Image: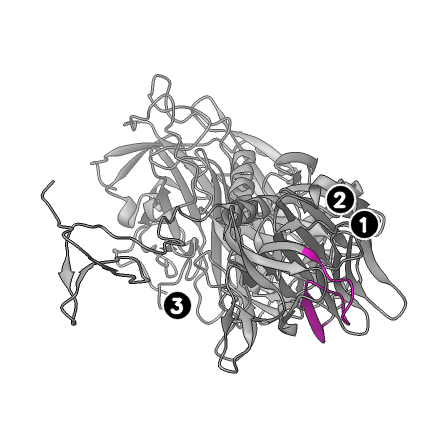
Amino acid sequence: MSEVATKNLTFWDTTDYKYPGFGQTAQISDGLGGTIGITYNQIDYDDRAWKGKPDGGIPITEDRLLSGEIENQFSLTGQVKGITVTMPQIRTIGRENNYSVTLDFSNYKASLAGSKATDGATCGDTYLAISRFFNGTAAGYTTIKVTATTLDGSPVNLADWKLFNSGTLGKGNNARVFLDAATQTISGKNSQGKQEFSPTPPNPGTSFGTDTGLGLFQLPSDQRYTSITLTFKQKKIKGTIPNDLHDIYVASNTTSTSPISETPETKPMDINSGLQLHLPLNEIVENAAKEKEVVDISGNKLNGKVHGAKIVPDSQFGNCVHFDGVDDYIDLPKETIPQTGEITIGFWAYGGKSLPKNTVLISAYNKGNQPLIRVYLPWSDRRIILDYGNPFDRIEKVGEAVDFKDKWTYWTFTKNVAKGEMNIYLNGSLWHSGTGKDKAIDLDSVVKVMFGRETYNSFYNGQIAHLRIYDRVLSPEDINECMKIDAAPPPMDINSGLQLHLPLNEIVENAAKEKEVVDISGNKFNGKVHGAAIVADSRFGNCINFDGVDDYIELPTATIPQTGEITIGFWAYGGDSQPKNSTLLRAENNGYVVNIHLPWSNSRIYFDCGSNTNTFDRIDKLVETSDFKGKWTYWAFTKNVATGEMKIYLGGILWHSGKGKNIPIGSATEVRLGSHIPNTEYYNGKVANLRIYDRVLSPEEINECMKVDGTPPPMDINNGLQLHLPLDEIVENAAKEKEVVDVSPAKLKGKVNGEAKVVAD
């Protein structure tokens, strides 16, 4: 051993350590006046199967630690103490032994008294050693997955861990340990999957065992951990594994201390940190194989394959996915489920009419079709349930219908295996929780992840927006930030879903010499004019006028959308003959597809939309004469088949509504503006800016349409100009006659008689 040492290590004192059993935490003196909690977590086997239960002793001598790359870097204070375990013997080729260990540093002394390092988390003076990394290519290998909880909430970055390998020992082959920051794993194999041996000369002492190694890790100063979880996997290839022990040591440098501020810097909130999946769920695309997919925008490209689910318009999110509750679902890649022992699942949900029923929104299963993760939203008895683990832990609580049905709510589900905590948040507030929930998942066994159902069906009915899955437990602040960002409505776009827009301010002739009003939506759904005329109007410049006798406009049948939603908006000025039996808009196909009476002779406004052989959906209400006659008013009519809502807006304000109106909006065989079909119930009055949408507009969008379409045209003093003579010059025409020039489009020049002259002024 070299006499030159740069850092002096003080190890934790495991002398009095007594193994309390899986899931139970024991405190160990850190050698500096604090303690470190250690918890062994069950994955594959129970306490009866240990070949040698965790035991606190002195696994190695000073000489055995201080060799190879470690030799000239460190000296020791006291003894090298750790905890040794012996895993069950693996007898079947391809089988694994798996368990995890959680180290809790919340009571840890970061350094000696007087140090500038704050307590309760690791620092640059903290060292973690792990020995007996098995690397026998003929028999099996050991891999350790590292996860951690950071003091500032930042994602774990193993790139800043500094690794020192021990040297080759006198007996057996001492393998080099490798750290893969990208996958957060430690193993006895290099990046090519091959074993390597430490190149230093032999060092006296007892072997760790054939083809095993020891790695000493200096933890970073710029990322501090309140807990670290090591998940051990030992897999058999063939033959007998000669050494199935694992040793863990924690030490602190007591020679030099890293200057860490008394108040650790809080990093800015980053809701992209640890983001495993983010499906906005606002569009469905086709991949190269012509399969329908929803796109993951997390950067991990974990797109979901769509089975039946559809994108529907929505007033809050613009578009969202809709599950019919019968056979709709989305397959997600198995990599969707994180391998960190932590998970957060968050999303916006709008439950459908069939709830509550047995529904599972998200589920993951293993090869044996055993559930690993399930989110019930809800079960038929209104229970909201989170299952996680194998066998699974569960937390559940009975919800109110208002929390899962007929309105948008934000749900978040979290689990931390190391801490045994499971939480459910509703609209950003903790709604239910459970402790002692430390069941983990053998993540390599995840073979199936479904969104919208479980393997036993239980199809979800409703709409979902912005599914997020994280490989960490989000803080309440993070959850509220996700809720806020994902709920932000898209920029207002009153052209989105616009099926028809007739300004109704001019009539043109088409190629067939038919009179038409022009659709400016881009769909070219021009209307054929029968009798109606364009008249001057002080507000709109020009507008269409229906005489109430025989005027109407024939619209294309494609004007009526087939999306299950509709918005019809327009400005109307009822004529002198109102109220009478009159129809402003009518679309039919052996029944009421759409029908608007504005008004009927009894001064009631009727809105019919959707019919079958037996009945039709209708809402109606008595209206004041001043709202339909003698002045301009803005009307909007909406229906959403999925939600069963029909609404009427007057002047941009909700005026009347009805629920339970779920009859579909069928295709039309004939559509008219200004009359019933056939030729009856003619409307009397003026109309401007008819709009029809294939979605339900929000109140804000309805008001924007009212504002845009109700804005008077720009002042135009050339409008109606019959003659304009500047009288600033006299010219001669071709006949040598003197004229003054008319600069209006009419070109009505004046002939000058007598001695009239242009003079300077």
| Distance Cα–Cα, label 2 vs label 3 | 70 Å
Residue 184 in sight in this render: yes
Q: Which residue is mark 1?
A: 620
SS category of the residue bearing label 2: strand
- Amino acid carrying label 2: it is His
* Dot label at residue 193: 3
Residue 377: % across, % down: 73, 50
> Are the residues flagged by discs 1 and 2 in contact, CB closer than 8 Å?
yes
- The image quadrant that residue 703 belongs to is top right
Residue 686 in percent (x, y) is at 62, 54
Residue 679 location, quadrant: bottom right
Binning the other alpha carbons within 10 Å of mark 1 as few (below 14), some (14 to 19) or many (20 upward) gives: some
Q: Residue at x 44, y 46 (%)?
A: 273
Residue beneath the point at 35% across and 64% down? 191
Q: Residue furthest bottom?
A: 512
* Foreground residue among 690 and 499: 690
Of residue 346 and residue 131, the one placed in the foreground of this image is 346
| Kind of residue indicated by mark 3 | Gly
- Answer few, some or many: residues within 10 Å of disc 3's Cα (few below 14, many 20 plus, some between 14 and 19): few
* Left or right placement of residue 277 versus residue 448 in this view: left
Q: Quadrant of the N terminus?
A: top left
Element class at badge 3: loop
Nearer the observer: mark 2 or 3; the answer is 2
Quickly name the residue at label 2: 656
- Which quadrant, please, contains the C terminus? top left
Quadrant assignment, res 633: top right
Q: Which residues are magenta?
A: 667-684
Query: What's the image's color scheme?
Result: one colour
